Amino acid sequence: PAVQRSTVGTWLGILPERAALFALVAIILGMINQIAAELRADHRRITGLMPFWLVAFGMVGGVILQAGIGLVQVYVERLVGVRFQDAEAMLAPLYALAAGASILVLMGLLIYGFLFLLRKPRAGSTVD
């Protein structure tokens, strides 16, 4: 509880929810890929590896950056006593990196969706 009081209102406070959301997205994408492969009766990758790695690096990088931003934010604001506006200015480069990680996730999801629609099972194809 003492640590939680220090992290309320910072990026560390929302870190568990963001990590759980990313895990849910990864599970859903994996299930969709497996179901589509079984519908095609073809057990090869439907979307390739590029979307997978973009999403994976974006998610892992985003969670690590969010934890880093939260730790710096707690240290600078709560322990050192720097004003909020000054702390936000100090964290601007980390915010840019976190935005870049989110862009990687978005690019991976868009490529994943495009390739999935491009290679979807044909109507009238049967599974033996």
Image: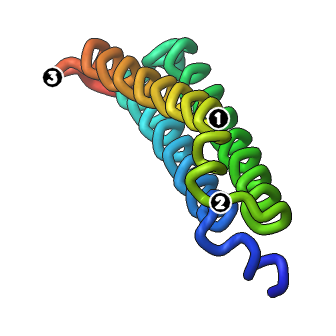
Q: Amino acid at mark 2?
A: Arg
Q: Which quarter of the image is occupied by the N terminus?
A: bottom right
Mark 2–mark 3 CB contact (< 8 Å): no
Q: Which residue is mark 1?
A: 94
Q: Amino acid at mark 1?
A: Leu
Q: Residues within 10 Å of mark 3 (few under 14, many from 20)?
A: few
Q: Amino acid at mark 3?
A: Ala
Q: Which of the two discs, 1 and 3, sits closer to the camera?
A: 1
Q: Residues within 10 Å of mark 1 (few under 14, many from 20)?
A: some
Front residue of 97 and 57: 97
- How far apart are the two marked residues, 2 and 3, measured between alpha carbons? 61 Å
Q: Which residue is mark 3?
A: 123
Q: Which residue is mark 2?
A: 83
Label 2 vs 3, first from the N-terminus: 2
**Residue at 66% over, 50% down:** 87
Label 1 vs 2, first from the N-terminus: 2
